[in-house]
Structures are given as structure tokens and as C-alpha cells.
Amino acid sequence: MMVSKFFTLAELTKSETASRRSIANEPDQEQIGNLTDLCLEVLDPIREEFGIPFSPSSGFRSLSLNEVLGGADGSQHLDGMAADIEIPGVSNRSLALWIRDNLDFDQLILESFSDEDPSSGWVHVSYSRENNRFESLTHDESGGYVNGVSKSEERESWLKGILNIKTAFPYFINHLIIALTIGFVFQDFFVGAAFYTGREIRDWQKLGYFDHAGFWWPVLPCVGIELAIKLNLL
Ligand SMILES: [Zn+2]
């Protein structure tokens, strides 16, 4: 039975483990509805975009199958809302980034991926009819998850890179240049303001505008923006 243009119910419920161990893996009407939404909103658009046939390695999982597979409690696979996918010949990072930038989704996870082997890992993606959270995560080598799916490992390890002079140096120089530029512009602004209002520059100095700290406070928004980009908030 086709649930969408490209996907059948059979391939969304198939499981080698289930058939080997004779575990029932049959979704009810509501779960089939969720699988259908997932196909229409996520899997079909991916298939259209990349033009390469693929079949999810895992879609719907019954409670007992999920237990046997060691899946998380409350996994969205249980509701038929999630699928694990890979496209032959496409890096899983590129796939995750395309989903992040082009589709409505609830949760997107780049799992067990390493840039050295573009076919490593897989992409877990879920869709919720009611409330898509647009949460994206990347599985970390340490076994945990970090926020966002980034364009490359280099960006991802930026925070770790603070200790790595080679990675951190260009950012530091950027901040310095931006901070000094903004600092000088503001200094000029206050000099101009003092001139036009006929006030003594000393009056402005009293207000603290000329403290040398004035040169440095723009560093804060710069660092903030940089951090937000790294964490994929921007
Ligand atoms: Zn999954």
C-alpha cells in the first residue's frame, strides 16, 4: 500500500529484527496517519530534491520492537512520526543540512556521522502535525548530543577550539577589528554630538562615554553574534 507518492507502508514498518524474532510491528490507524504525514511533508520532498530512490532503515517501531532495538523510551518511532534515512551517494551531513534549511520538521538528528566517511551514520527525522519544534541535534563523539547541525566539523568544534589557537585566532582578529571599528565610530559620534550641542567634551567624559571601556563593550555583541552562529541560532 502506497502511503505517499514514493513510499509504501511496508517499507515504513519493515524490520529485519522484527521478522527474525517474529515481533509484531503493525501500526494502528493513527500511527499510519502519522507515517503518511511524515512521508508527505518530509520523505517525499527529500526524494524529489535529491532524485535518488531510498528506503528508510527504520520507520515505525512497535513497543516490543523498540525495546529489543534498545530505542529510547518515548521515541517518536513508536508513534510513526520518525524515520531513519540515508541517501546513497549523499553525505548525511548534507542531507541533514538540506532538511534543516528547507523542510518543516519536529526533530532532526545527525547520528554517528564523521566527515571522513560521508556515508557514516544516518539522519533521524520526525514530523509532528500539531507542533513542529524544529529541533536539530548532532550526535557528539563523546556520546552526547550538541545543538544544531553545522556545515562542518570545524565549526562544530568551535567551543572546543577556543583552546586551539589555530581555530580561535581568526575569530579573535575579527572581533578585534569589528570592536575597534564600532568603538571609533561611537567615539566620533560623541565628539560630534558634543560639538553640536555646544557641550564640553569633558561633560561627556563625566558621563563615562569616553572611558576606554567604551572601546571594548562592542566586543560583547560581536562575541554574542559569533556564539549564536556557532550554535546555529542565527
Ligand atoms: Zn531514529
Image (tube, helix red, strand yellow):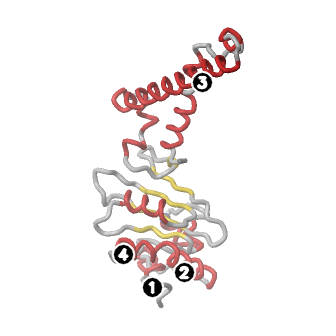
Label 4's element? loop
Of residues 30 and 159, the one nearer the viewer is 159
Other-residue count near label 1 (Cα within 10 Å), few / some / many at <14 / 14–19 / ≥20: few
Q: In the depicted view, which residue is nearer to us: 103 or 125? A: 103
Find the distance from the CA under tag 4 to the CA under tag 3: 59 Å
Mark 1 to mark 4 CA distance (whole Å): 13 Å
> Which numbered tag is attached to residue 47?
none
Residue under label 3, please give it. Answer: 189
Q: Look at the numbered disc 3 and give the secondary structure of its residue.
A: helix
The one of 225 and 17 positioned closer to us in this rendering: 225
Numbered disc total: 4
Q: Label 4 belongs to which residue?
A: 54
* Disc 3 to disc 1, C-alpha distance: 61 Å
Tell which tag, 3 or 2, sits nearer the viewer: 3
Circle 1 — which element? Answer: loop
- The residue that mark 1 highlights is 5
Residue 55 x/y as whole percent? 39, 76
Q: Amino acid at mark 2?
A: Thr
In the picture of the structure, the residue carrying the numbered disc 2 is: 36
Q: Are marks 4 and 3 in contact (CB under 8 Å)?
A: no
Residue 150 location (% of width, % of height): 43, 50
177 over 103 or under it: above or below: above
Mark 4: is the Cβ under 8 angstroms from ligand 1? no
Do the residues bearing badges 1 and 4 touch, measured as CB atoms within 8 Å?
Answer: no
